[in-house]
Image (tube, rainbow, N blue to C red):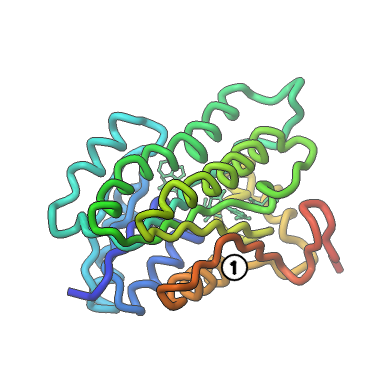
């Protein structure tokens, strides 16, 4: 058994997947979650054979409270000693103004990015408190720092992640549990494909003319945050592509 256990929500793609790979190479056993079961199975097989660590997978929709609670509570005893919780599962659905956006998209973003993060944290934090140790990394966004037009609800959910994280940090302070928010700018993952409902041309436009961050860039940042000494906590970290200066300012060539 490797030394530590990390649970990553949304590990079937993008930042979560790259983080799984990098933690597997750095003495972590992994609990990986997501809705796409076949991807979880393939990733478990890949990581266990490439890196020799143990992987436990959980297939559930984090928007669904009962499903999430049942899945997380089903974690076997030896896996409950979770050192690191990475609340990563999330998405943007659509890009539209408040007067015409699809209300279902709003529900999806709020249920995933805010309520899902809370459901997972509610189950795992008592286990960390019992062991008086732990590190929670909440994946925020530049959208948690700034608001941009047509992104009111996505920005709202990521502002909520920032506020929830600040309060969590104070609440968990007496127990020695670290809380970190990582807020990336543009990262080329499946994010824009999901936002634009599979429209690849539109998704590609988002990253056109500049070099975006990769999932691996964020994974390496997460490893840096996790590998600080016990007395150091990186509280809040904004990471942007060199060619991006705000949510809306890009140096495109
Ligand atoms: P991807 O679309 O590549 O990955 C998203 C992950 O979230 C997938 O593993 C997906 O798994 C999981 N997920 C989404 N909805 C659910 C759900 N209802 N239940 C369970 N799992 C779910 O995007 P990213 O890797 O880019 O996104 C990861 C996080 O980073 C998100 O919180 C996003 O908001 C944030 N972020 C992304 C940025 C970017 O530019 N890409 C920038 C800043 C922040 P599955 O579909 O299998 O369920
Ligand atoms: C994803 C980055 O700029 O699309 O969180 O909000 S952005």
Say which quarter of the image contains residue 152. top right
* 218 over 185 or under it: above or below: below
> Residue at left 43%, top 60%?
178
- Say left or right for 149 vs 32: right
- Residue 222 percent location from the top left of the image: 49, 68
- Residue 206 percent location from the top left of the image: 73, 54
- Residue 228 percent location from the top left of the image: 46, 76
> Residue at left 67%, top 51%?
203
- Say left or right for 117 vs 201: left
- Residue 177 percent location from the top left of the image: 39, 58
Q: Report the front residue among 140 and 249.
A: 140
Residue 43 seen in this snapshot: no
Q: Secondary structure at mark 1?
A: strand
- Say left or right for 115 vs 182: left
Q: Which residue is mark 1?
A: 214
> Residue at left 76%, top 71%?
242
> Residue at left 38%, top 66%?
20
Q: Quadrant of the C terminus?
A: bottom right
Say which quarter of the image contains residue 54. bottom left
Q: Quadrant of the N terminus?
A: bottom left
Which residue occupies the extreme front position in the image? Answer: 174
């Amino acid at each position: 058994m490797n030394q530590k256990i990390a649970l990553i929500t949304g590990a079937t793609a993008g930042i979560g997947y790259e983080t799984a790979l990098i933690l597997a190479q750095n003495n972590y056993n992994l609990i990986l979650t997501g809705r796409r079961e076949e991807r979880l199975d393939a990733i478990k097989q890949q990581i266990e054979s490439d890196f020799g660590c143990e992987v436990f997978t959980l297939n559930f929709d984090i928007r669904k409270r009962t499903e999430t609670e049942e899945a997380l509570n089903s974690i076997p005893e030896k896996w409950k000693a979770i050192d690191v919780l990475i609340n990563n599962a999330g998405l943007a659905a659509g890009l539209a103004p408040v007067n015409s956006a699809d209300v279902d998209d709003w529900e999806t973003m709020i249920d995933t990015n805010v309520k899902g993060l809370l459901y997972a944290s509610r189950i795992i934090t008592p286990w960390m408190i019992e062991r008086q140790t732990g590190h929670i990394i909440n994946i925020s966004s530049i959208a948690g720092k700034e608001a941009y037009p047509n992104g009111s609800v996505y920005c709202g959910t990521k502002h909520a992640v920032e506020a929830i994280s600040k309060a969590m940090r104070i609440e968990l302070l007496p127990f020695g549990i670290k809380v970190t928010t990582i807020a990336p700018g543009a990262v080329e993952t499946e994010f824009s494909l999901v936002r634009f409902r599979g429209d690849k041309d539109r998704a590609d436009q988002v990253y056109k003319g500049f070099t975006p961050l990769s999932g691996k860039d964020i994974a390496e940042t997460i490893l840096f945050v996790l590998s600080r000494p016990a007395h150091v906590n990186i509280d809040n970290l904004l990471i942007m592509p060199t060619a991006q200066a705000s949510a809306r300012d890009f140096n495109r060539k």
